[in-house]
Amino acid sequence: MIGQKHKKRIFSGVQPTGNIHLGNYLGAVKNFVKLQSGGNEALFCIVDLHAITVWQDPKVLRSSIRELAATFVACGLDSNKSILFSQSQVSGHAELAWIFNCIARMGWLNRMTQFKDKAGKNKENASVGLFAYPALMAADILAYHATHVPVGEDQKQHLELTRDIAMKFNNDFQVLNFFPIPEPIIEETAPRIMNLRDGSKKMSKSDSSDMSRINVQDDNDLIALKIRKARTDQEPIPEEVSFLEKRPEAYNLVNIYASLVNCSPEDVLRDFSGKPFSYFKPRLVELLVSELEPISKKIKELLEQPEEIDKILNDGATSARKISDPIIRSTYEILGLTKNLE
Ligand code: AMP
Ligand code: TRP
């Protein structure tokens, strides 16, 4: 395994906390679906061990894991084309995370902006896990020798840290190329979907107002209501994208439309310039409903058959272990430890 070349392998993870919203769908999951079809080997992981870095109600966590698995499948992730599984089912993640805790430096983790944001003013009371979170993320990726990681902008810093950990490990133990140095896949065309009530914030699971986001499981009436109430301004739709730059809420709705029909914001303006938002919004609702209605129907169907979901996750975990077990075993050996998997 030393000095080896790494074949292209994609890994990404999503936390099973709260509803999957339009931002997750257009910004992440839709891209996963595209990536699994390119003949790539891909793993998509429900990162439940990351979720418990803040307190989770065990009953809610259990159902959120199934719900995210159902959402993945309903959005088009196919367990015949990629590996879908939950992190806690594959013990290698936690084992490698510990090793990486011993590789990463305090100074590196101290610079992570997500920890600062999440811990807020009460840093002393944050869990050690929340601080070490990026080392677990590095373990997720490197346990599979993954080479490409589709992530949002906000995760770029964690991926940089993953690269630093891989390089330091390879260097400290003189195992050239043992861990690949993974690359981010930042989908240029995937827009940042903004909060429907405040275009300066991104759409997020954690906003206290449900009216600020469209969840993939919202029913048609709720989608219509949320778009009707979405903040805009009095101006009609302009001719050029540059005129939208100071109108974040208007820009956001145009972006959502463009992303749903796979065109550019310019194309949307070509069709709608001069029209008021009262004309545009019902068209956007139609699009959203036609995209999301089949997905939420499928999620509901799957949730009625939890044993189906569990089977997908169990099979996924078995396939994942086949890849990561030998890598973890080699990692132990490199460190002078013995791992007797047989
Ligand atoms: P999170 O909800 O923060 O767990 O997000 C999971 C992934 O969804 C992120 O890594 C991003 O790729 C994507 N994502 C989350 N929120 C948005 C958003 N508002 N716009 C676009 N992509 C998003
Ligand atoms: N930290 C990521 C997020 O909050 C989720 C994640 C965990 C992840 N492990 C990963 C993403 C590995 C990509 C690769 O969105």
Image (tube, helix red, strand yellow):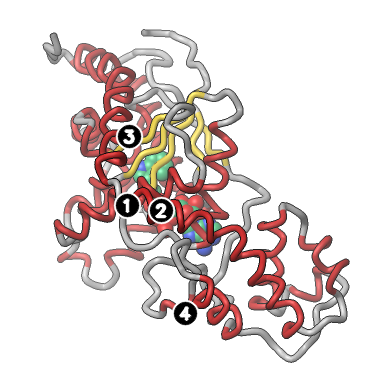
Amino acid at dot 1: Leu
Q: Which residue is mark 2?
A: 299
Q: Residue at x 57, y 64 (%)?
A: 193
Q: Secondary structure at mark 3?
A: helix
Please name whichever residue, 169 or 87, is drawn nearer the observer in this view of the structure: 87
Q: Which residue is mark 3?
A: 312
Q: Earlier in the sequence, mark 4 or mark 2?
A: 4
Are the residues at dot 1 and dot 2 in contact (C-beta closer than 8 Å)? yes
Looking at the rendering, in which quadrant would you find the C terminus? top left
Q: Position of residue 237 (x, y in %)?
A: 80, 79
Amino acid at dot 3: Ile
Q: Residues within 10 Å of mark 1 (few under 14, many from 20)?
A: some
| Figure quadrant of residue 100 | top left
Q: Residue at x 22, y 37 (%)?
A: 101
Q: Residue at x 29, y 46 (%)?
A: 305
Q: Secondary structure at mark 2?
A: helix
